[in-house]
Image (cartoon, helix red, strand yellow):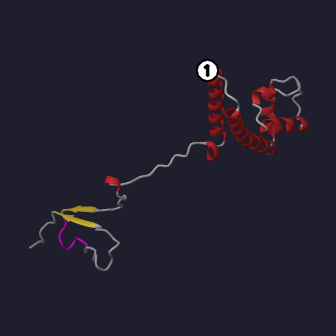
């Protein structure tokens, strides 16, 4: 096990191996490597180290995607257990790559909003004013002068003018 004091060559090796597709947990289990906690302490101590670690994780996701192709292209055994194991390995790598780098390896989800029967959504604002005299009610919009503006006012139950 490596000392808890920061060691640049060891950290570089961890990042290099992580970027090549070795799981972080398996790297930290080796005798000549720092523990999981020590590595996370090193990463949190310095923003430059954190950036290098994040970049290594992004490259790790890309490496997992490449491993998927290798596993899928390997000769398949007639043994169903082997095929199931290969599928599990592929699915685990797909899931991990999608979580680490969703913009590149995640499923693309597009939400589209539409109005009734697929029509565009209408943005319309109407004000309803009750119990106003015709004199109190503002003028209505002239649609001939401004066809893009919807009705902005509906006057309901106006009071009759005072005598």
For image coordinates 31% across by 68% down, the residue present is: 150
Quarter holding the C terminus is: bottom left
The image quarter containing residue 124 is: bottom left
For image coordinates 86% across by 39% down, the residue present is: 12
- Whether residue 97 sits left or right of residue 48 in the image: it is left
Quarter holding the N terminus is: top right
Number of numbered callouts drawn: 1
Question: Magenta: predominant secondary structure element?
Answer: loop
- Whether residue 47 sits left or right of residue 110 in the image: it is right
Image coordinates of residue 135 in percent, x first then y, are 20, 74
> Can residue 113 be seen from the camera position used here?
yes
Q: Is residue 7 magenta?
A: no
Q: Residues within 10 Å of mark 1 (few under 14, many from 20)?
A: few
For image coordinates 28% across by 75% down, the residue present is: 143
Picture layout, residue 33 above or below residue 13: above
- Whether residue 120 sits left or right of residue 27 in the image: it is left
The image quarter containing residue 114 is: bottom left
On the image, numbered disc 1 is attached to which residue? 80
Picture layout, residue 17 above or below residue 153: above
- Whether residue 109 sits left or right of residue 93 in the image: it is left
Q: Is residue 134 magenta?
A: yes
State the SS at label 1.
helix
Image coordinates of residue 23 in percent, x first then y, are 75, 31
> Can residue 44 be seen from the camera position used here?
no
Q: Which residues are magenta?
A: 132-138
Tell which of 130 and 13 is nearer to you: 13
Picture layout, residue 55 above or below residue 127: above
Tell which of 102 and 152 is nearer to you: 102
Image coordinates of residue 128 in percent, x first then y, are 25, 61
């Amino acid at each position: 096990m490596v000392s808890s004091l920061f060691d640049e060559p060891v950290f570089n090796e961890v990042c290099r191996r992580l970027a090549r597709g070795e799981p972080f947990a398996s790297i930290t289990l080796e005798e000549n490597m720092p523990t999981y906690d020590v590595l996370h302490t090193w990463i949190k101590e310095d923003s430059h180290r954190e950036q290098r670690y994040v970049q290594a994780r992004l490259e790790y996701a890309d490496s997992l995607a490449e491993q998927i192709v290798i596993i899928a292209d390997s000769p398949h055994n007639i043994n169903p257990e082997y095929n199931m194991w290969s599928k599990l390995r592929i699915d685990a790598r797909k899931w991990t790559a999608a979580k680490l780098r969703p913009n590149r390896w995640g499923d693309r989800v597009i939400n589209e909003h539409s109005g009734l029967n697929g029509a565009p959504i209408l943005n319309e604002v109407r004000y309803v004013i009750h119990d106003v005299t015709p004199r109190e009610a503002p003028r209505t919009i002239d649609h001939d002068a401004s066809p893009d503006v919807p009705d902005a006012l509906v006057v309901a139950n106006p009071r009759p003018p005072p005598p």
